[in-house]
Amino acid sequence: MIKKLTTPTKKINLEEIQEGQDEPTTSSDRRLLACFEALNVHFHFLAEPDLGKLHTKAKFQKLFDIGVLSLHSAGKMKSKEFGELFKDGAPVHVETADFVIAMKKDLRSEYRKKLIECAEINKWELMVPAPFAHHMMFKVCNKAVTGTTEVTEEDPFDLSGL
């Protein structure tokens, strides 16, 4: 397996690619890197409405090894049901509002505080330092997660009043 992963792969010369001049193909032009295929790594890109309903299916409970949440999906952290999707010890990267230009600096720090409050609902630990300055990283701690919390329709990250 190690020999397979260390073998050089075919190189792509980006200058040879003519952008916008080729007809779309019916075959899949994109493939996972060989190392991901060899390690049996799967990526699941989720958005609404799937993200909001995922916790209702038993097969997804404690399934995910890692999570990456955007500004839009970070509001799901306020629900214990959402926290139960991750395996114990899973890292969850959460995008911050640090580069949202329309947001004032004091509101950016307030957004980080709200993320920490939502993580506390699920008893996630804040990992310091985070690997990227524009993300916060939490460690999922749900060995014995039981019970649920009521999720309200109010969005804690609603920025419409700015």
Image: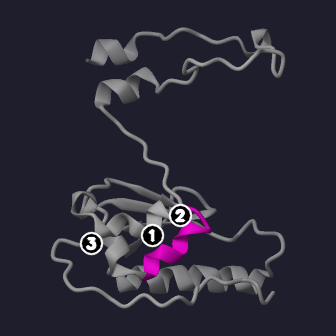
Task: Name which residue type carries label 2.
Answer: Glu
The quarter of the displayed image where residue 54 is located: bottom left
Callout 1: 10 Å neighbours few (<14), some, many (20+)? Answer: some
Q: Which residue is mark 3?
A: 141
Q: Position of residue 14 (x, y in %)?
A: 73, 16
Type of secondary structure dominating the magenta stretch: helix
- Identified at 47% across, 87% down, the residue is 117
Give above or below for 24 relative to 58.
above
User: CB under 8 Å between callouts 3 and 2?
Assistant: no
Q: How many C-alpha atoms fall within 10 Å of the one at disc 2: few (<14), some, or many (≥20)?
A: few
- Describe residue 128's horizontal placement relative to residue 121 as left or right: right
For the point 23% across and 72% down, which residue is it? 142
Most distant residue in the front direction:
26
At 30% from the left and 30% from the top, the residue drawn is 39
Foreground disc of the pair 3, 2? 2
Q: Which residue is mark 2?
A: 48
Give the residue type that dot 3 points to: Cys
Q: Which mark is residue 52?
A: 1
What element does badge 3 sit on?
loop
